[in-house]
């Protein structure tokens, strides 16, 4: 019996340095708000490390030292809260902006604090100008910080149903859509503008996609629908992106279709439209003719493949046990990576490979043990999550 050949993973040298400067994610703000009981919020520049250490010392000192000395019988750690409303904020913009920053850093607090936030706004937003200012603040946050686009869309949906003010100029949802239309009308110029202009345009496109998915419109009979105007707008935005096939425009189009493609196609099919077919055809033309990078062309082809598998969706009638390679596009997604004796990678989806000799129990034992198995079983070696077959 031939001795199993062990594949040794290459040693990678790290370029990380302990002396590297602090890293701040894109859109991160180092303006921290200090909340001190009985005092208005204080805004100042502070290092995140210093802030973290200060909070830890504050919590330890008051809960342990003073508590054990009898100075404080019970103490709640200092936490940022909006339960007291806006008494400590001199202007609406400061209150709203602080809450938006709070949601950006702690999105999990949305469910617990959004009701109080809306109630506070109902007592403060009583004029057309205040409502316009509120819309602009949320729009700017959602389009300047990409991680906030989804949360911003959820926030817009909630406020559109819970803000009581409805002036002649339009309610919250109407003013929001008007603001989006202002950006939409310059789509053609923005798609061919400079890097900064295109980046701002892409943020708007993705925010509009999130709005389409999250903004609910209740009909007179209580039924909930999506805004058809946004569906039309997204179609035209895709046209603008594909008409200017620069790499960043095409990447934005891929992100938008991954986000909304399945919902858009379902809506178009219900109306008997073939818009998605036209979009896929346009993508294929871009891959053939456009001077975009190879990586972007691969992204476009992967998107076409995703759409051909019904956007990765599996019919609800199929259970896990009933899933097969024919009815589940993700059937082989969690399979390990296999290699032939020549080092060529392949998966269970490749025909003509000796997978009938590898039963699930065998693969499970192999993954758990991470040891080479006899060569008559078809396995030469197992290393770092990869299986090499003879």
Image (tube, rainbow, N blue to C red):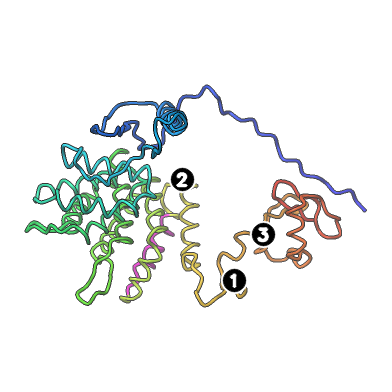
Task: Report x, y in % for residue 144.
Answer: 30, 42
Q: Is residue 383 left or right of residue 142?
A: right
**Nearer to us in this view, 126 or 300:** 126
Residue labelled with disc 1: 320
Can you give x and y, in whole percent of width and height, for residue 173 in the image? 19, 58
Q: Quick one: label 1 or label 3, which is nearer the N terminus? A: 1
Q: Which residue is mark 3?
A: 347
In magenta stretch: residue 212: no
Tell me the crowding category of disc 1: few under 14, some 14 to 19, or many 20 or more residues within 10 angstroms, Cα based: few
The residue depicted at 6 percent of the width and 58 percent of the height is: 168
Horizontal side, residue 188 vs residue 314: left or right? left
Q: Position of residue 107 (x, y in %)?
A: 37, 48
Could you tell me how far apart the alpha carbons at marks 1 and 3 are, in whole angstroms? 20 Å
In three-dimensional space, the C-alpha distance between marks 2 and 1, rounded to whole angstroms, equals 39 Å
Assess whether residue 279 is covered by the magenta stretch: yes
Residue at the outermost front position: 70
Q: Secondary structure at mark 2?
A: loop
Give, as a single range, the part of the protein colored magenta: 273-286
Q: Is residue 192 visible?
A: no
Count residues near mark 2 (Cα–Cα under 10 Å), then give few for <14, some for 14-19, many for 20+: few
The image quadrant that residue 33 belongs to is: top left
Please say if 309 is above or below 29: below
Which residue is tagged 2?
293
Sequence order check, earlier mark of 2 and 1: 2
Q: Nearer the viewer, mark 1 or mark 3?
A: 1
Q: Quadrant of the C terminus?
A: bottom right
Q: Main secondary structure of the magenta part?
A: helix
């Amino acid at each position: 019996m031939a001795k199993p050949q062990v594949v040794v993973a290459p040693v990678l040298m790290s370029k990380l340095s302990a002396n590297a400067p602090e890293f701040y994610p894109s859109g991160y703000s180092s303006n921290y708000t200090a909340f001190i009981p009985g005092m208005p919020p204080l805004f100042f520049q502070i290092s995140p490390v210093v802030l973290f250490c200060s909070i830890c010392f504050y919590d330890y000192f008051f809960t342990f030292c003073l508590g054990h000395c009898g100075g404080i019988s019970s103490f709640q750690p200092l936490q940022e809260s909006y339960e007291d409303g806006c008494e400590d904020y001199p202007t609406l913009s400061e209150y709203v902006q602080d809450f938006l920053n709070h949601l950006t850093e702690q999105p999990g607090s949305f469910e617990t604090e959004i009701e109080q936030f809306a109630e506070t706004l109902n007592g403060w937003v009583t004029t057309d100008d205040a409502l316009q200012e509120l819309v602009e603040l949320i729009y700017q946050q959602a389009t300047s910080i990409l991680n906030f686009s989804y949360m911003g869309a959820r926030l817009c949906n909630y406020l559109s149903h819970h803000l009581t003010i409805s002036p002649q100029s339009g309610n919250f949802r109407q003013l929001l859509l008007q603001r989006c239309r202002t950006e939409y009308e310059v789509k053609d110029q923005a798609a061919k503008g400079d890097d900064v202009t295109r980046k701002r345009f892409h943020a708007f496109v993705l925010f509009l996609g999130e709005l389409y998915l999250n903004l609910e419109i209740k009909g007179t009979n209580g039924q909930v629908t999506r805004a058809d105007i946004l569906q039309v707008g997204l179609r035209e935005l895709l046209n603008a992106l594909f008409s200017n096939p620069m790499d960043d425009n095409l990447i934005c189009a891929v992100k938008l279709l991954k986000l909304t493609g399945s919902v858009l196609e379902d809506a178009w099919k219900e109306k008997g439209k073939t818009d998605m077919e036209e979009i896929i055809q346009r993508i294929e033309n871009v891959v053939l003719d456009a001077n975009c990078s190879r990586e972007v062309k691969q992204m476009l082809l992967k998107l076409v493949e995703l759409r051909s598998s019904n956007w990765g969706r599996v019919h609800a009638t199929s259970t896990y046990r009933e899933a097969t390679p024919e009815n589940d596009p993700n059937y082989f997604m969690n399979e390990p990576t296999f290699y032939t004796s020549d080092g060529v990678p392949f998966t269970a989806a490749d025909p003509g490979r000796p997978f009938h000799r590898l039963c699930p129990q065998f693969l499970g034992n192999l993954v758990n043990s991470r040891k080479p198995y006899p060569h008559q079983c078809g396995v030469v070696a197992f290393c770092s999550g990869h299986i090499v077959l003879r």
